[in-house]
Amino acid sequence: MADYDPLRPLVPPAVGLAAVLVAFGGVVYAMAAAPWFSPLYYALSDLGARGVPTAPIFNGALLVGGALGAGFVVAVLADTDHPIRKAGGIFALLAMLFMAFVGVFPLPHPLHGLVAVPFFLFLTLAVFLWGGGDYAAGRELRGLVLVLLGVLHVVSWTWWFLFPWFPPGIAIPELFGAAAFAVWGGWLAVEEFERVRVDRERL
């Protein structure tokens, strides 16, 4: 029988936080490193276009963050019994995989749009469903926050489709989605750290 490793329960939340920091932090860093970039006039993917100096930062962040995030979501799914949350977790796993694909197929690769669109669709469904599952399971605060973030993401895309000239940058709805996904992953990871701490104190 293998010895119990007290650090093992800390691995999933650590991987989850690392995914958020690498992916979202990498995007923010790429934005800061590109003086020409403005979310009012560009898409986030422009930061990762071939030949752009920030491409290794942006694409690398999505690729590594997606891989780490997929590992975290697998651990979350294994610890989730609620059917609505489980559905949200499955969409979160798909979102992580497609986020990594966005880094693999940067602009102007013909597959870029085919992986970027599903990424935002899956992350929206993931946040909505997990929030709905939280609310149904009695976690009203987190549930309402996540559902509200999902609504804001949908509203931002609706605004852009209806009024693409004000402002023309597609990065704004993209940032809403990225932030919502980061809040979801970060919140779950932090709570898992707290749960591990409480379990240790009970031993």
Image: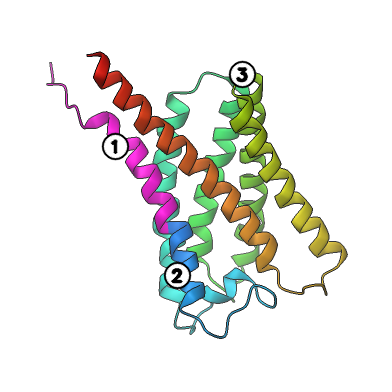
Task: Residue 120 in the image: state x and y as whole percent.
Answer: 64, 53
Q: Which residue is under mark 1?
A: 11
Q: Which residue is under mark 3?
A: 138
Task: Residue 105 in the image: state x and y as whole percent.
Answer: 52, 67
Is residue 92 on the magenta stretch?
A: no
Q: Name above or below for residue 113 compared with residue 66.
A: below
Q: Residues within 10 Å of mark 1 (few under 14, many from 20)?
A: few
Q: Which residue is under mark 2?
A: 29
Q: Nearer the viewer, mark 2 or mark 1?
A: 2
Residue 70 bears which disc, if any?
none
Is residue 13 on the magenta stretch?
A: yes
Specify how the rendered protein is coloured. rainbow
Rounded to the nearest whole Å, what is the CA distance between mark 2 and mark 1? 25 Å
* Quadrant of the drawing holding the N terminus: top left
Rounded to the nearest whole Å, what is the CA distance between mark 1 and mark 3? 27 Å
Residue type at mark 2 is: Tyr
- Left or right, 111 with respect to 156, comes to left
Residue sitting at 30 percent across and 26 percent down? 197
Q: Name above or below for residue 65 compared with residue 12.
A: below
